[in-house]
Amino acid sequence: MENQRNVILAIGLMALVLFGWPYALEVFYPARPATIEDAVEAPRPGLKNSNAVPDTGTAPKVIRERKAVIAGSARIPIDAPRVAGSINLTGARLDDLVLKDYREKLDKNSDRVHLFSPAGTEDQYFAQFGWIGEGVTVPTSQTVWTANGTKLTQKTPVTLSWTNPAGQRFEIAYAIDANYLITVTQRFVNSGTTPAIVRPLGLINRTSANADPSTWTVRNGPLGVFDDVADFDVHYDDLDENPKKLVEYNGNIDWLGFTDHYWLSALIPAPDTKGKMAGNFRALGGKLYQSELLFDTTVVAPGKQIQTKSMLFAGAKETELLDDYVDAKGIKLLDRAVDWGWFIWFEKPIFKLLNWLFEQVGNFGVAIILLTIIIRGLMFPIAQKQFASMAAMRAVQPKMKALQERYKDDKQKLQTEMMELYRKEKVNPLAGCLPMFLQIPVFFALYKVLLLAIEMRHQPFALWIKDLSAPDPLTPVNLFGLLPFDPPSMIAIGVLPIILGVTMWLQFKLNPAPMDPVQQQVFSIMPWVLMFVMAPFAAGLQLYWAMSNVLTIAQQKWLYSRHPQLKELAAKEAAEKAAKADGKGKA
């Protein structure tokens, strides 16, 4: 009884650690908070309103079709290896960006992912670069710029220019790499006769209407790295509820922007400008929000010019690509845009191993199976001890039953005699718990990988499993798709969760049977409860757990077949059955 109580306690602790640990960390070890009073940017000399809202125009009251808005404005096309789209010459906006390698849905004919969309569309989301100034006419959201090229490609940068009535010239040069990084060079040439006070800036404007929601395991929304610390504490609701509708940062800003489940837009200052800027997250109302990167204010004398550089990341949160930008471009902690959490030290190696296996076999489902075999292989010696302990427990069960019958009215004496039995038979009832605890970080790491890594998105396995990052779609509830309805996720039990439940039931059958009837009932229904619990999870995670169960069962049966005490017990049980059969025959 004590053994079964410990096992139930161990399982309860596993569930608590698995599902409660990240939440506890957020409570007791929160990320760097975004303060207002302590981190408000000091007033800049020479600019009366250093926190003026950068001009992005008023929000249109009528929502128009994306294609119609794009077609109705003069544009410079973008055609890079992994992105397409256009730059709007009105306002010099990057408001049309399509990711060539990703589609909205699993269907191969589905539209490609539109990351940026113009103002006035349902999915408004764009980047804009400009200036705030005093004593100078600066370009606005309605300014029409002139381009020195016909297309922005990896090999052909494009520069937009505009000259104000005083002859002062503004330039924005765009260059794009082979992936998702756009380098932006802003230049102001004071060809006028008086000094000009200007402050360069970059901003990202978006609606939250199409934003991915944050959960306790995945953080979406405003995000940035400040003073080498990733700040996960600002949410859209926080900005709405803030009296100033504004959260400001000062000091060393590494990057800031908006993150969704798989996508990121981020403003990144050039390395030589660190510490010479301020950053804001701002609520504009009507579900519109803005992240802003503002450089130092500069007084530009007549005949002089200033130039500032920054970068814009707009694309998919591919793990190895983000790591490359951290190393090659010096963009600190850009990889934290993927919310690995506190177990990043373990989760990223699991991802790298899984991704390497995928590169070898070309199928993520097969890679998950190989990963399961590797993990079970590494844990084989520990599992052997676990199964040996369970085998010993099964072998002494008749003696435990005899003790329970003898001391059923004396619980204290029963516990003493059972401990003596454990010592005599060299049985440790807790030895079987260690492998279960060792599985927790592996299980959670794979859960996070399947949940977060875009590399898993829309990856097929075999047969009906077309997306390992989504739940198993085939369920008997609608007769495997024959009935024309989609059941609620809680009861949409797929084939993989059913296999998982069956294999867990078989695994429990090989374990020592609980002595207490209540505990027997708990263990008998647990596989089927977990089957329902796991149904909404990614098919890849279900595949891992089911495969792990199959390997565990095989290892248990092999070890039990070789255990001397179980052999003796099996022989004794066979002899008893033969004797009973012989007795019935004679009767």
Image (cartoon, rainbow, N blue to C red):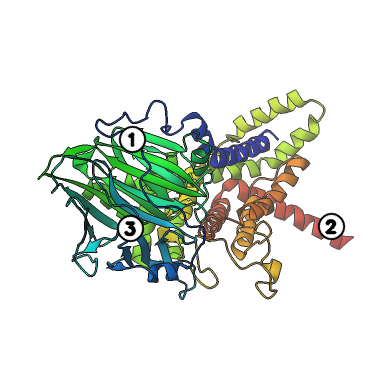
Q: Amino acid at mark 3?
A: Arg
Which x, y percent locates residue 261?
46, 53
Labels 1 & 2 near each other (Cβ < 8 A): no
Q: Earlier in the sequence, mark 3 or mark 1?
A: 1
Q: Secondary structure at mark 2?
A: helix
Q: Secondary structure at mark 3?
A: strand
Q: Which residue is mark 3?
A: 93
Disc 2 packing (10 Å; few <14; some 14–19; many ≥20)? few
Which x, y percent locates residue 371?
43, 56
Q: CA distance from mark 1 to mark 2?
A: 102 Å
Q: Which residue is mark 2?
A: 583
Q: Earlier in the sequence, mark 2 or mark 3?
A: 3
Residue at image location 46% in from the left, 32% down from the top: 30
Q: Amino acid at mark 1?
A: Asn
Q: Nearer the viewer, mark 3 or mark 1?
A: 1
Which x, y percent locates residue 15?
59, 41
Note whether residue 370 is visible.
Answer: no
Q: Which residue is mark 1?
A: 49
Residue at image location 53% in from the left, 68% down from the top: 465
Front-most of 124 and 527? 124
Q: Is residue 131 left or right of residue 402?
A: left
Front-most of 514 and 440? 440
Q: Is residue 197 left or right of residue 104?
A: left
Q: CA distance from mark 3 to mark 1?
A: 24 Å
Q: Secondary structure at mark 1?
A: loop
- What is the residue that sits farthest to the right in this orientation? 587
For the image shown, how many numbered marks are present on the structure? 3
Front-most of 527 and 82? 82
Residue at image location 53% in from the left, 37% down from the top: 241
Q: Nearer the viewer, mark 2 or mark 3?
A: 3
